[in-house]
Amino acid sequence: MTTTKPTDWHDAKLDFSKDMSYGDYLGLGQILSAQHPLSPNHNEMLFIIQHQTSELWIKLMLHELHAVRQQMRTGDLPPAFKMLSRVARIMDQLVHAWDVLATMTPPEYTAIRPYLGQSSGFQSYQYRELEFILGNKNATLMQVHLSAPENYAKLDAVLTTPSIYDEAILLMARSGLTIEANRLQQDWTLPMQSNASVQAAWTQVYKAPEQHWALYELAEKLVDLETSFRTWRFRHVTTVERIIGFKTGTGGTAGVSYLRKMLDVVLFPELFALRTEL
Ligand code: HEM
Ligand SMILES: N[C@@H](CC(=O)c1ccccc1NC=O)C(=O)O
């Protein structure tokens, strides 16, 4: 008769007919059956999983940033700092993810591209929400989402309310720093515009950090996040140029030249401009 020797996994639970398992908890049935390549090309699985994992990480960034915005409204900054650090590390992870996608060569992608139709990352509502909640508002781009009312409503709620950066400015005003009244009651759907009183207030913070420590720390967390985001944009455009050259985008933009313009976006303009004054 053979006897089983006790091992490190001897007491491991093996029967999940009645109990919640790993896959049940994580909803793996749904997640792992959501890859549906349309082309016969081997590399399409990479393309799909790269985008799906990016969207999952963006979902987590949004989850964190909505909580950050709430904590900023109530003035509870230490938990917000921790969440902002997490968001910046997620963005760094997405920066490194470009290395995986860059293993796809132009002929490999060319075999997949005709199957993508007019779909494009340009239509990612989570990505647009990420831009909006950080302050890069663009009301025109809402049109893309008219055909999906639930996504439209969520995006509209973020478009029409103060961004994380607006909340930082409101917080500065509540802390006694002088901010122009117009900037505190503006139309929140407007694109980012630099404001002299905001820059002057941040400059005061940076010139006397010990008097404004929480705002100082918040500012540096935002600069960290913007730095990671800029790196993501840069890796996107360089990876795209490497794979499709200067072809127009499936989403209808000029492609690389559109993405290059996006490198000029500054999410928190005064935080960068003030550095010249220090
Ligand atoms: C082979 C890989 C990729 C190519 C060739 C590519 C190409 C492009 C192009 C040409 C655009 C401009 C819009 C258009 O006309 O289509 C665009 C936009 C965009 N792509 Fe990609 N992309 C790639 C991978 C990715 C990945 C992995 C993500 C991650 C989620 C992504 C997210 C986006 C987003 C969010 C936009 C909109 C950017 C904005 O409006 O600022 N792309 N992409
Ligand atoms: N805009 C890309 C297509 C593309 O990359 C894409 C298509 C469908 C789903 C996600 C995509 N990724 C990012 O834009 C292109 O022009 O090739």
Image (spheres, grey):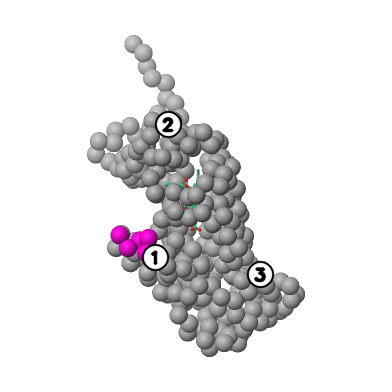
Q: Residue at x 35, y 61 (%)?
A: 145
The residue type indicated by label 1 comes to Met
The residue at 56%/51% (across/down) is: 256
Q: Is mark 2 within 8 Å of ligand 1?
A: no
Real-space CA distance between mark 1 and mark 2, rounded to the nearest whole angstrom = 33 Å
Compare marks 3 and 1 and give the one earlier in the sequence. 1
Using the image as rendered, state which of residue 50 and residue 168 is in the foreground: 50
Which region of the structure is painted magenta?
142-147
Q: Is residue 164 above or below residue 38?
A: below
Q: Horizontal and vertical percent for residue 252?
A: 44, 54
Which residue is the site of mark 2? Answer: 41
Q: Residues within 10 Å of mark 3 (few under 14, many from 20)?
A: few
The secondary structure that most of the magenta stretch takes on is: helix
Q: Is residue 144 magenta?
A: yes
Disc 1 or 2, which lies upstream in sequence? Answer: 2
Q: Secondary structure at mark 3?
A: helix
Q: Give the labeled residue for mark 3.
A: 272
Q: Position of residue 3 (x, y in %)?
A: 37, 16
Q: Residue at x 55, y 41 (%)?
A: 243
User: Quick one: label 2, few (<14), some, or many (20+) residues within 10 Å?
Assistant: few
* 157 relative to 254 in the view: left or right: left
Q: Quadrant of the N terminus?
A: top left
Instruction: Classify mark 1: helix, strand or loop.
Output: helix
Q: Which residue is mark 1?
A: 142
Indicate yes or no whether the magenta region holds residue 33.
no
Circle 3/circle 2 CB separation < 8 Å: no
